[in-house]
Amino acid sequence: MQLKGLHHISMITGNARANFDFYTKILGLRLVKKTVNQDSPYTYHLYYADEIGNPGTTLTFF
């Protein structure tokens, strides 16, 4: 099997506000979507990508 690329990478953050500030203001990614984590309704699921959504640019955080 040949790997052709990644769809996204998911990570965990302990501070959603600092996470948002870093990925949008420092790295220049855009917040694509913010949902509630299905397993923990008190936790956000944040999605970031580049401006046009190029493959492999999506990062998600819980």
Image (cartoon, rainbow, N blue to C red):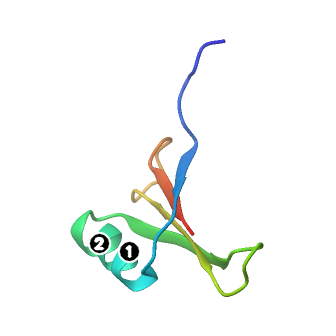
Q: With respect to residue 27, does 24 lie above or below? A: below
In front of the other: 9 or 42:
42
Report whether 56 appears left or right of 28. Answer: right
Q: Which mark is residue 34?
A: none
* Residue 48 percent location from the top left of the image: 47, 63
Q: Residue furthest front?
A: 14
Q: With respect to residue 18, does 10 lie above or below? A: above
Residue type of the residue flagged with mark 2? Phe
Q: With respect to residue 33, does 1 lie above or below? A: above
Q: Which mark is residue 19?
A: 1
In front of the other: 15 or 32:
15
Which residue in the protein does label 2 denote?
A: 22
Residue type of the residue flagged with mark 1? Asn
Would you say the residues marked 1 and 2 are in contact, meaning their CB atoms lie under 8 Å apart? yes
Query: On the rendered image, what quadrant is the C terminus found in?
Result: bottom right
Q: Residue at x 77, y 72 (%)?
A: 39
Query: On the rendered image, what quadrant is the N terminus found in?
Result: top right
Report whether 20 appears left or right of 4. Answer: left
Label 2: element kind = helix
Q: CA distance from mark 1 to mark 2?
A: 5 Å
Report whether 53 appears left or right of 42. Answer: left
Q: With respect to residue 27, does 33 lie above or below? A: below
Q: Residue at x 42, y 81 (%)?
A: 15
* Residue 35 percent location from the top left of the image: 65, 77
Q: Residue at x 33, y 72 (%)?
A: 24
